[in-house]
Amino acid sequence: MKDFTVDNLTAEVVRAYTANTQSPRLRAIFSALITHLHGFVRDVELTEAEWFEAIGFLTATGQKCDDKRQEFILLSDTLGVSMLVDAINHPKGGAGTESTVLGPFHVGGAPAMPFGGDLRRRHLEEAEPCLVTGRVVDSTGQPIAGATLDVWQTSANGLYDVQDAHAPAWNLRGTFTSAADGAYALVTEKPVSYEVPTDGPVGRLLAAAGRHAYRPAHLHFIVSAPGCETLVTHIFVAGDPYLDSDAVFATKATLIGDFKASQDAELGERFGLPTPFCHLEFDFGLMPS
Amino acid sequence: MKDFTVDNLTAEVVRAYTANTQSPRLRAIFSALITHLHGFVRDVELTEAEWFEAIGFLTATGQKCDDKRQEFILLSDTLGVSMLVDAINHPKGGAGTESTVLGPFHVGGAPAMPFGGDLRRRHLEEAEPCLVTGRVVDSTGQPIAGATLDVWQTSANGLYDVQDAHAPAWNLRGTFTSAADGAYALVTEKPVSYEVPTDGPVGRLLAAAGRHAYRPAHLHFIVSAPGCETLVTHIFVAGDPYLDSDAVFATKATLIGDFKASQDAELGERFGLPTPFCHLEFDFGLMPS
């Protein structure tokens, strides 16, 4: 019979999870998972009280999730795991736009909008109107027509629509299609920096580490087109005070956008904006899949 | 601003969680947790689809928990983590009885029972009656009077009362107090081997690894007394076919009990059992706290 001790346990657990596992990939995952999980427990000599606290933390994290809140993604984000997965799967380099984390607030099925469509389904006094224009191009710089741009962001009050009982459905969410010359355009609010939700287990974790919960202001994009690798990314607002301490470690230098005050009255008029107005120009480069 | 890559991310996440953390213990835990978590992701080059599967698995594990089911403890148990925590905190050696995992089915506040009390609150035809007797002693072998023994086990159908809609409340659960000479006695069912719950995420994990879900038959005990370290342990049934492949890696050679067929009619009569009857004798040794 098996007589388990600190010395023989980990090898036996790895054996139990790999002996009958057919998939080499799954065997590799089980082996690394068990080795690192046990390695953590050994390295810190986890006490029973700490183990029990961890069980309670993980349970509460799962129970905080519902159809509008994903606390485990938030945990992964705030521990840098989401960004690490992104960095491994989309290494730096090449002609394409860099990716960053999806975040927990994407909602599938956002309404399709026309070229230049306005994402604002209400008007908050503190919100600054913003025009976003640019092109979607391939790795050789040629325009991609018919690319889909799925866009979402927080409102000027720092909340995504799904967090805000007063927000109209789909506020500041929409999908756009690039034109024949690859161009896209949309009207929205200038993004603001905001706190990730702190009323759950992740908020307690951040507080325990003395970390603030702010993310630098950004617009979310998922840009996709046939034959191209789907791009999940943000555009950050240059000059944001939290660019150096993003709660979810998602900042990249190439993803900083210059949100300028534009005096171009003709352009503003075309999109229904009084001059001067905030204007971001940003081109997305997609890589072949 | 921070520009994160595979190469600089982990160090920055560790820095963010340790820079403002006052407690050295918490700093050590954050640092080891992040290092091993990121190490796992790096070692296997986790794909985005696998990450998403992991998020879904952890979320479902949390959501499977309620006041009678603790799927995260079951996950910890089946990954050998609970047993590792136990082994680290209660190393082998010394005069005391060895410990093993608590398991997810302990319920606090079980009814106090007299010496020789019967834990069976129903009588299943397939259940074999069993007398359990022994003493609680200290590290020098002297009897401990007034020790508390909190006992629980599955029924002959392989279910704990809290898993079984047909079981009376507190079936096969109770607390006993050792007598002046350290003795305790109780009547119960002979334990049977049983499957851990397989209708949740942990069941899917075991199936993916081709592992069976059986635990070798055992009685759970928490034995406590003033001035002593509380003992959380099992007594396993000698000869059980799963002693070599416990789903939760909790077996120890010194915790095997000899459940004998007794011909001692006088003893049987004293506890209301017809001869022959199943009899386990097991002494518990507690260490000073």
Image (cartoon, coloured by chain):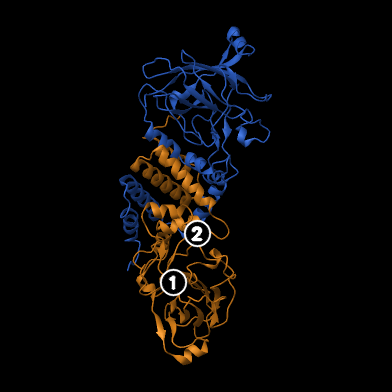
Chain colours: A orange, B blue
Residue B112 in the image: state x and y as whole percent.
56, 24
Q: Amino acid at mark 2?
A: Ala
In the rendered image of this protein, does residue B281 appear above or below residue B21? above
Name of the residue lying farthest toward the top = B266
Residue B224 in picture, x, y percent from top left: 45, 25
The residue lying at 45 percent from left, 70 percent from top is: A233
Asked whether the residues under the numbered discs 1 and 2 touch, taking CB atoms below 8 Å apart as contact, a structural biologist would say: no
Side of A26 relative to A94 (left or right): right
Tag nearer the camera, 1 or 2: 1
Mark 1 is surrounded, within 10 Å at the Cα level, by few (under 14), some (14 to 19) or many (20 or more) other residues, namely: many
Q: Are marks 1 and 2 on the same chain?
A: no
Which residue is drawn at the image coordinates 53% and 53% (left, top)? A64
Residue at the disc numbered 1: A192
Callout 1 secondary element = loop
Chain holding disc 1? A
Inter-mark Cα distance, 1 to 2: 30 Å
A88 horizontally vs B166: left or right: left
Classify mark 2: helix, strand or loop.
helix
| Residue A98 spot, x, y in % from top left | 40, 71
Res A76 label: none
The spot of residue A212 in percent (x, y) is 38, 60
Task: Check disc 2 and report the residue beneath it.
Answer: B49
Q: Amino acid at mark 1?
A: Val
Is residue A205 visible from the viewing direction of this image? yes
Q: Which chain does the residue under circle 2 lie in? A: B
Q: Residue furthest front?
A: A125
